Image (spheres, helix red, strand yellow):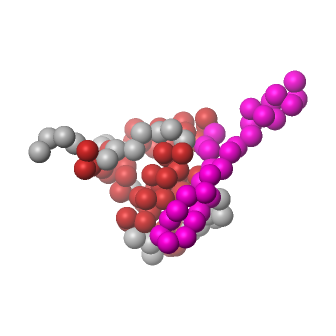
Amino acid sequence: MADALALLKQVNTKTVDFNGGEVEVRELTFNQVKEFSELAKEIEDVESFENNRQSLGLIIRKGVVGLEEVTDEDLGASSVASLKELAEAVLEFNGLNVVDDSASGND
């Protein structure tokens, strides 16, 4: 039984290309995804959520190996495009939908 539980709790990682280098993203736990959902409910629309430093920071801290301790100051010194790209890589690896503005189909 303990082996099955250990396998259940195992968190997988994946290396993704980012800004000319590579970073390792990790699977999120059920509780972490729940935390994101609760934060998203507090933010009125998807665009605001995607551009919100708090939400991007939360996803990056939980989902990128080596950035667990990244500060708000470090995040603030990063481009929004880079933060969004990194957060989207985490979300995609976890099978969570990422809104693509270019795929709206209403031209």
Report if residue 2 lies within the magenta region.
yes
Q: Which residues are magenta?
A: 1-29
For this rendering, which residue is in front, 94 or 71? 94
Q: Nearer the viewer, residue 69 or 83?
A: 83
Q: Which residue shows up at 61% across the image and 43% down it?
A: 28
Left or right: residue 10 versus residue 61 is right
Question: Picture quarter containing residue 2?
Answer: top right
Q: Is residue 40 above or below residue 75?
A: above
Indicate the position of residue 91 as horizontal and vertical percent values.
Answer: 49, 46
Q: Position of residue 13 (x, y in %)?
A: 66, 50
Query: Could you say where residue 88 lies in the image, as x and y percent from the top left?
Result: 45, 52
Q: Would residue 24 appear left or right of 85 to someone viewing this image?
A: right
Q: Nearer the viewer, residue 14 or 70?
A: 14
Query: Which residue does the image show at 11% across and 45% down from the upper left?
Result: 107
Residue 106: horizontal and vertical position, in percent? 14, 41
For the image shown, how many numbered marks are present on the structure? 0
Residue found at x 74% / y 32%: 8
Q: Is residue 22 magenta?
A: yes
